Amino acid sequence: TKDSYHIITMDTKESSIPNLPMKEIPGDYGVPFLGAIKDRYDFHYNQGADEFFRSRMEKHDSTIFRTNVPPGPFNARNSKVVVLVDAVSYPILFDSSQVDKENYFEGTFMSSPSFNGGYKVCGFLGTTDPKHTTLKGLFLSTLTRLHDKFIPIFTTSITQMFTSLEKELSEKGASYFNPISDNLSFEFLFRLFCEGKNPVETSVGTNGPKIVDKWVFLQLAPLISLGLKYVPNFLEDLVLHTFPLPYFLVKGDHQKLYNAFYNSMKD
């Protein structure tokens, strides 16, 4: 699957892989360096994500093809991928011997470990790394331990969310859902992992969701497009997609967030 593939047919009674000759994977990566930038512009500005993949699928008459994916230079060491856009070939992504997951988070990109205290979090580790299994076990055992708290804490949080929505509607005649929903999500997770404690009572106060948004944005900026009407594409591409945004812009806030969780989780 790294260099070629079989055409797989589906039968109504059973699935089978016929004894067909191997077929070369179509597509290319364009001119070195410039090809990756061109594909990045197609993905974000010229075509959009859906048309980017659909047009190449139609061009190569194949649901498996080669191309570059964002963010490309200089945010990713290698933008070359083999794209799978059909359900039959998708399971190959779960085969660690065929697909390398080390140091990747979204596509070919991994944000700086600085955003996570200098550590490579589980999502950045290869599946053969012993720490990957250890961390995944920790997550699952923690969630198992907290299983009886999910529904009660969520019920409390979502009740407060709808109360806030109704209050805004009655006072202003309109309500913007996203900020209130973000507050719900943050409060739910904080209460779940911190023995029911309200995050407002910690060092983050009411700024928890805003800090998380800023922390996530700085990491994922190379993968998004803001779609600002009066900002030229080349300028947005230069600022967001060309170089990683630095951790120091959120360092102080992130430390507050860390301290709030660390001091509230107890046992």
Image (cartoon, rainbow, N blue to C red):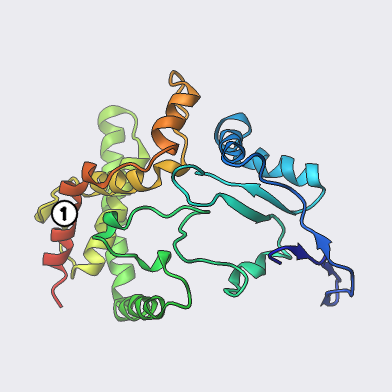
Residue 132 seen in the current view: yes
Establish if 233 lies above or below 104.
above
Identified at 62% across, 71% down, the residue is 98
Residue 156 seen in the current view: no
Identified at 56% across, 49% down, the residue is 79
Q: How many marks?
A: 1
Q: Position of residue 114 (x, y in %)?
A: 27, 55
Quadrant holding the C terminus = bottom left
Label 1: element kind: helix
Q: Residue furthest front?
A: 32
User: Is 37 placed left or right of 255 in the picture?
Assistant: right
User: Is 140 placed left or right of 1 in the picture?
Assistant: left
Quadrant holding the N terminus = bottom right
Disc 1: CA contacts within 10 A as few (<14), some (14-19) or many (>=20): few
Determine the image quadrant of residue 89.
bottom right
Q: Position of residue 243 (x, y in %)?
A: 39, 40
Query: Observer-nearest residue: 206 or 16?
Result: 16
Q: Position of residue 121 (x, y in %)?
A: 35, 65
Q: Position of residue 85 (x, y in %)?
A: 69, 55
Identified at 26% across, 61% down, the residue is 118
Q: Which residue is mark 1?
A: 255
Determine the image quadrant of residue 29.
top right
Q: Residue furthest top?
A: 230
User: Is 141 placed left or right of 31 in the picture?
Assistant: left
Identified at 60% across, 75% down, the residue is 97
* Amino acid on which disc 1 is placed: Gln
